[in-house]
Amino acid sequence: MAAPRPAVNVFTFRDAQTSPDPVQEPVTEGPAIIVLDNGSFQLRAGWAGKGPSLQLRSVVARSRGGPRSLSRVGNDIPNLEPLRWLLRTPFDRNLPVNLELQELLCDHVFQKLGVASQGYVDHPVVFTEAPCTPLHVRQMVAELLFECYRVPKVSFGIDGLYSFNHNHKCLSPASGLIVSSGYHCTHILPVLSGRFDAKNCKRVNLGGFNAVTYLQRLLHLKYPGHVSAITLSRVEEILHDHCYVPEDYMEELQKWRCPFYYEENVHKMQLPFSNKLLGSVVPSEEKQERRQQQLRRLQELNARRREEKLQQDQERLDRLLYVQELLEDGQVEQFHKALVELNMDSAEELQSYIHKLNIAVEQGRQRVLTEAMDCKPQTPETMGGEQDDMEGISELDPMYSEDQGETEKAAPNVQAVFNIAQFHQMYLGTERIRVPEILFQPSLIGEDQAGLAETMHYVLNQYPHNVQLELVKNVFLTGGNVIYPGFRDRMVKELLQMRPFGSFFQVSVASNPALDAWHGASDWALGNVEGEDGWISRAEYEEKGGEYLKEHSASNRYTAIHLPKPAPRSTAAPTVQETETAPQILMTTAE
């Protein structure tokens, strides 16, 4: 008989679980500035110059109307899947709009960073935000930091610009085109001589969240028998470890049609399963032993419950007897107050409750003493037909049933006709390239918007030719969604197709796309410790409000938006001449 072939390209899920973050020692030497990269997928925080010591998911497990003290934040949730229905996030796409949940995240961060000040945060804070953040959102965040935590000063900056500056320290001020792709959105940010051009930046409403949900939907349709095992956490693991961006999507699809290419490149994901065969028969002795174990466990559980019930009844009886003694001692006023607390109306009702509790306590004591004297295990026949216990056995051991009480007939051994492990495998073929492709072709998931390459082409066309040459010399990719293998090569190919023949361009990727935004904010904070440029002080907040923003090299810009004035509505009926000219005006506008 030939030896079985070894498993090729079979991967198992890590199902990694997080552990609570330890409380760190407060900073006593050097500048103590807190840098907080407030991402919609992951929040990264730490002391400037010390590294991002806290990295946690931006989620809070909290039931509706539940107390604040029972909320669990970030890494305090070891496994997200059992609490998926309780998870809340302060973000709407990439904007923090729920101030209460954002406060819970900030509370967790400041506590774990070891902030020593009591009742307030006596440290400057650098806070990242999205490009072109609405004033209302910045006002809420500034109100939270200044009013709730009473920080001395705050600086707001764009995560993509911080990452750009961190990777171009020697070229400052630099020009370039930033492609920042995150969990919910992808931004195209033009930078001219170190200044962010907010008027011509564009956003594509696609990111890692869309890729995760799309991949989960594909796998659910492909493997309907394993829907419960294909969780979002496992789909995220597949997306991060097994997907890639091809240089030419259609050409790569043609390669996947070849059986040999498919066999060599398919990734098989092993789902958890049990080695126990469905048709296997458990011996009668093992079933009887398991039955006895379940009976013993059930007896111990019932005995513990009876003891707890006896203790509760005894405590309540003592309380009622104390109230009765108040009446016998002549303390009538205190007696009536105690009756109100017990929700009783008269002394006769109190006496009735005392009589019932006396009987219940005595019966409970007798039962406990009887069980203590009789130590031998009971069998189902000697238990007096207690239906509750038999139902409890069925709940504790799903393999137990009443039919097993009869004599088991010998059954032939069942031979496995297939490999049960292969039945619990998912084959990742074209899904590995189809899911990341939605960034370049949003129509794959039914989104009616331009892809990444088309949006870049549109942004470049807003500038004259000489400025375009300056921008494409430094196309910079950052954000957690650009870590796909092959992403840079695909961007090079797209630029080669859209740029004129013989044009020069260069595409670079951040040294650490996920963490360079935090490192860039840390660099800026350490370089502007003493100065006031870019910092909003508490006095300025109280004078100018939460919408106030001080611009710096990595911040948003104030952009004047000219809205068309609405045409005045006239109450008079239109004349014949106005009626005839109205279609001409509409046509001119349409043209």
Image (cartoon, rainbow, N blue to C red):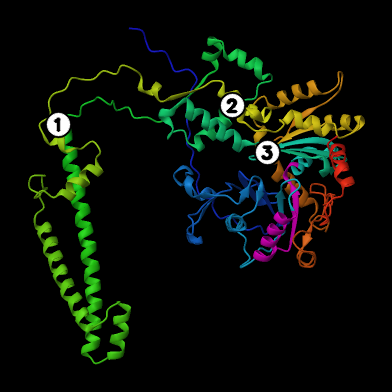
**Taking the image as drawn, is residue 141 in sight?**
yes
Q: Which residue is mark 3?
A: 205
Q: In the displayed structure, does residue 530 sit left or right of residue 116?
A: right
For the residue pair 39 and 63, the one nearer the viewer reads as: 63
At label 1, the amino acid type is Ser
* Closer mark to the observer between disc 3 and disc 1: 3
Q: Looking at the picture, does residue 165 appear above or below residue 368?
A: above
The answer to whether any part of residue 271 appears in the image is no
Picture disc at residue 243: 2
What amino acid type should be assigned to the residue bearing mark 2? Answer: Cys
Total numbered badges shown on the rendered structure: 3
Along the line of sight, the residue nearer the viewer: 111 or 183 = 183
Q: Is residue 560 left or right of residue 72?
A: right
- Distance (Cα) linking label 3 and label 1: 62 Å
User: Is residue 150 rendered magenta in the image?
Assistant: yes
Numbered tag placed on residue 236 in the rendering: none
**Crowd around label 1: few <14 · some 14–19 · many ≥20 (10 Å):** some
Query: Label 3 is placed on what type of residue?
Result: Asn
In percent of width and height, residue 435 lies at: 60, 28
Tell me whether the residue at label 3 lies in contact with that at label 1, contact meaning CB atoms closer than 8 angstroms: no
Rendered image: mark on residue 284: 1
Tell me the magenta residue range.
135-160
Q: CA distance from mark 1 to mark 2?
A: 50 Å
Residue 294 image position (x, y, % from top left):
20, 44
Which residue is located at x 91 percent, y 32 percent?
464
